[in-house]
Image (cartoon, rainbow, N blue to C red):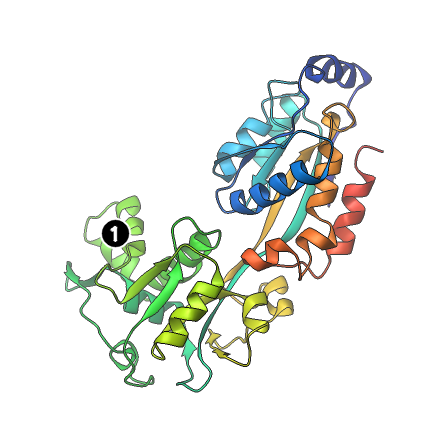
C-alpha cells in the first residue's frame, strides 16, 4: 500500500536531489526484528549489484520511523524498517517535516510454530501453557517464586507427563521478539499474572520484564543458529519441543508434528490473516522523494521483495520469514514507486 498523503512539491524534490547527491549508499534503520532480514538482503544486494552495500541499523521500529520523519536529504535515512504499521501521528510528523510521499511495503510475516518429534506426544497449546512452562518465576500469592515445573502435565493436566525441554529462538534470532511478545508475555497477560503483579504494586515495565524472563535451569535452551540446529536437538532428545519458522516445518513434516496454538493449526493462510496468533506483518517504508536521487534505492527495494529473496524458497524464509501470499501485489507497489 502506498501512503501518498500530499504530493511532494517540485521545490522539495529539487532540495532533496541537491542535498542527497553527495551520498551514494542507501541508509536504513528501524526494527530489531526486521534487522536480520534487511541485513541478509543488504549483503546479497552488495554482492550482486553495482551499488554499495546499504547501511542497515537497528534501534527499534519507533526510533527508525522517528529518524525517517526528520525530513529529506542526505542526512536523513531512506528506509525505515518496522514490525508494525506506521501510526497516524508518525505520518503527521513526517508530513510536517516535508516527508509527504511514503511507500509502505509489507514484505512478509513473522510467524513461528511449535513442533516436536513426529512419533511423540501431540500438543494443543495456548500462550498460557508456554508462559507457565518457561517463565523464570511464577507469581503466587503475591510473591515471585522460582519456576520448578519439570513436566508438561504439571503445566496443564491435559498434557502428557513429558519432560519440559524447549528449544527456543536465541536473543540474536529474528523471531525471538515475536516469541517473547506473542507467546510468553501474552500468556502472562491471558493468565492474569501480569495484572496481579501490577495490582501488587509492581510497575508495568517491571511486570512485563518479569513476565518475559526465561528460566535458565536447562529446561529452555536458546538456539542462535538456524532451524537445522533446533531439529538436531529434537533428533537427539525426543522430549524436545522446538520453535521453528513455518517454512522449515513444512519442509520437515516427515520428522516433525506441529502443535496448535489457541486451537489454530499454523498455515500460511492462517498467519497472513492473523487467525494464527503467533504472527505479525513486517514492513519497510520508503521515502519516495529519495528514489532516483539515492543510487540503488529502488533497486534495493525491488530486490528485497523479489521472489528469489522474499518468496517461500528464498533466504528470508530459510531464516524464519513467512512469505506473503500477496507478494506479487507488493512487488507492484514497489515497481510503481517513484514513477
* Point 61% across, 46% down: residue: 283
Residue linked to disc 1: 198
Residue 87 visible to the viewer: no
Q: x and y percent of residue 265 in the render?
A: 54, 76
Q: Which of 222 and 177 is in front in this view?
A: 222
Q: Where, quadrant-wise, is the C terminus in this rendering?
A: top right
In the rendered view, tell whether residue 73 sits above or below residue 231: above
Relative horizontal placement of residue 196, taking residue 49 as reference (left or right): left
Q: x and y percent of residue 306 in the render?
A: 73, 50
In the rendered view, tell whether residue 98 sits above or below residue 90: above
Relative horizontal placement of residue 55, taking residue 14 as reference (left or right): left
Tell me the element at label 1: helix
Relative horizontal placement of residue 96, taking residue 171 as reference (left or right): right
Q: Classify 10 Å Cα crowding around label 1: few (below 14), some (14-19), many (20 and above).
A: some
* Point 64% across, 18% down: residue: 74
Q: x and y percent of residue 68 in the render?
A: 59, 29
- Counting every numbered tag in the picture gives 1
In the rendered view, tell whether residue 251 sits above or below residue 310: below
Q: Which of 152 and 189 is in front in this view?
A: 152
Amino acid at each position: 500500500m502506498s501512503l501518498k498523503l500530499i504530493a511532494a512539491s517540485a521545490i522539495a524534490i529539487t532540495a532533496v536531489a541537491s542535498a542527497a547527491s553527495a551520498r551514494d549508499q542507501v541508509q536504513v534503520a528501524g526494527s530489531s526484528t526486521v534487522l536480520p532480514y534487511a541485513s541478509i538482503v543488504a549483503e546479497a544486494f552488495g554482492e550482486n549489484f553495482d551499488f554499495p552495500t546499504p547501511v542497515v541499523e537497528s534501534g527499534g521500529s519507533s526510533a527508525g520511523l522517528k529518524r525517517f520523519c526528520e525530513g529529506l536529504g542526505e542526512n536523513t535515512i531512506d528506509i525505515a524498517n518496522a514490525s508494525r504499521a506506521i501510526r497516524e501521528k508518525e505520518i503527521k510528523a513526517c508530513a510536517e517535516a516535508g516527508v509527504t510521499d511514503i511507500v509502505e511495503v509489507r514484505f512478509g510475516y513473522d510467524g513461528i510454530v511449535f513442533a516436536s518429534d513426529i512419533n511423540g506426544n501431540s500438543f494443543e497449546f495456548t500462550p498460557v501453557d508456554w508462559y507457565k512452562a518457561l517463565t523464570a518465576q511464577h507469581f503466587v500469592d503475591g510473591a515471585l517464586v522460582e519456576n520448578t515445573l519439570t513436566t508438561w502435565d504439571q503445566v496443564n493436566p491435559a498434557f502428557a507427563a513429558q519432560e519440559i525441554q524447549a528449544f527456543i529462538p536465541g536473543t540474536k534470532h529474528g523471531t525471538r521478539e515475536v516469541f517473547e511478545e506473542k507467546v510468553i508475555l501474552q500468556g502472562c497477560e491471558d493468565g492474569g499474572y501480569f495484572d496481579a503483579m501490577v495490582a501488587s504494586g509492581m510497575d508495568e515495565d517491571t511486570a512485563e520484564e518479569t513476565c518475559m524472563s526465561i528460566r535458565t535451569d536447562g529446561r529452555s535452551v536458546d538456539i542462535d543458529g538456524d532451524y537445522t540446529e533446533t531439529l538436531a536437538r529434537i533428533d537427539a532428545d525426543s522430549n524436545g519441543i522446538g520453535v521453528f519458522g513455518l517454512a522449515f516445518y513444512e519442509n520437515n513434516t516427515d520428522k516433525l508434528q506441529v502443535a496448535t496454538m489457541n486451537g489454530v493449526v499454523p498455515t500460511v493462510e492462517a498467519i497472513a490473516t492473523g487467525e494464527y496468533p503467533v504472527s505479525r506483518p513486517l514492513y519497510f517504508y520508503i521515502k519516495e522523494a529519495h528514489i532516483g536521487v539515492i543510487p540503488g534505492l529502488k533497486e534495493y527495494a525491488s530486490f528485497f521483495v523479489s521472489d528469489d529473496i522474499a518468496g517461500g524458497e528464498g533466504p528470508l524464509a530459510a531464516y524464519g520469514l513467512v512469505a506473503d501470499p500477496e507478494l506479487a501485489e507488493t512487488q507492484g507497489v514497489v515497481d510503481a514507486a517513484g514513477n
